[in-house]
Amino acid sequence: MKTALVVDDSEAVRAVVDHTLRAIGYSVVEAATSTDALAILTSGNMASRGASSAENTAGEIVLMISDLNLGEESSGATLIREAQRLYPGLKCILMSGSKSPRQSLRTPYPVLSKPFGPKELADAIDKLTRDNSTDAATC
């Protein structure tokens, strides 16, 4: 099964994204901080972080969706750059509550503006996963 890592400091946002991802066929692992997300990505066993031990290993995460603003700790853009260093083929999407985050950040990563609905998230994932290149579609 395809696995997605959802990173957001808001439990409510993680729950909504989790629900949508499960509805389109992903298993989901959640993290509230970039530190937790990196621990999950570098871990060989995600059982303690919400996935059954038979279900996943960190290497099977194929998609990461991260909030742009992860509080004082770090930014989502910094997190996905580090994730790419670890897993160059990992597909990534940023989420932001800012009105026009992609333009103001000049980020090459796909950005979903909050609030977004299940269809917008599913469409963004579909577009991202159809692109097998290693340009802006990967983090």
Image: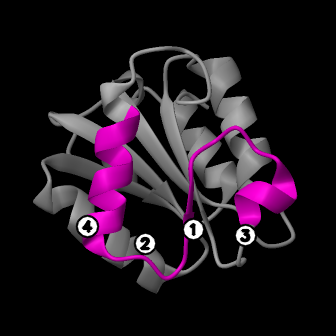
Circle 4 residue:
119
Between discs 1 and 2, the one toward the N terminus: 1
- As helix, strand or loop, the secondary structure at mark 4 comes to helix
Among numbered discs 4 and 1, the one appearing first in the sequence? 1
Is 123 left or right of 43, judged from the image as shown?
left
CA gap, disc 1 to disc 2? 6 Å
131 or 82, which lies in front? 131
Give the image location of residue 17, x and y in percent: 35, 68
| Residue tagged 3 | 100
Nearer the viewer's eye, disc 1 or disc 3?
A: 3
Residue 48 visible here: no
Distance from Cα at disc 4 to Cα at disc 3: 20 Å
Mark 4 and mark 2 lie on one chain; the one further toward the N terminus is 2
Q: Which label number is shown at residue 8?
A: 1
Please tell me which residue lies in front, 56 or 117: 117
- Is there a contact, CB below 8 Å, between mark 1 and mark 2? yes
Relative image position of residue 47 (x, y in whole percent): 31, 45
* Separation of marks 3 and 2 at Cα, in angstroms: 21 Å
In the picture, the quarter occupied by the C terminus is top right
Residue at the image position 63 percent from the left and 40 percent from the top: 38
Question: The residue under label 2 is which amino acid type?
Answer: Arg
Marks 4/1: CA–CA distance: 19 Å
From the viewer's perspective, tell me whether residue 16 is left or right of residue 134. left
Query: In the rendered view, would you say 4 is above or below 94?
Result: above
Disc number placed over residue 14 in the picture, else none: 2
What is the span of residues highlighted in magenta in the rendered image? 101-128
Residue type at mark 4 is Lys
Whether pointer 3 and pointer 2 mark residues with C-beta atoms closer than 8 Å, the reply is no
Identify residue type, mark 1.
Asp
Image location (x, y in percent) of residue 118 = 27, 71
User: Is residue 124 rendered magenta in the image?
Assistant: yes
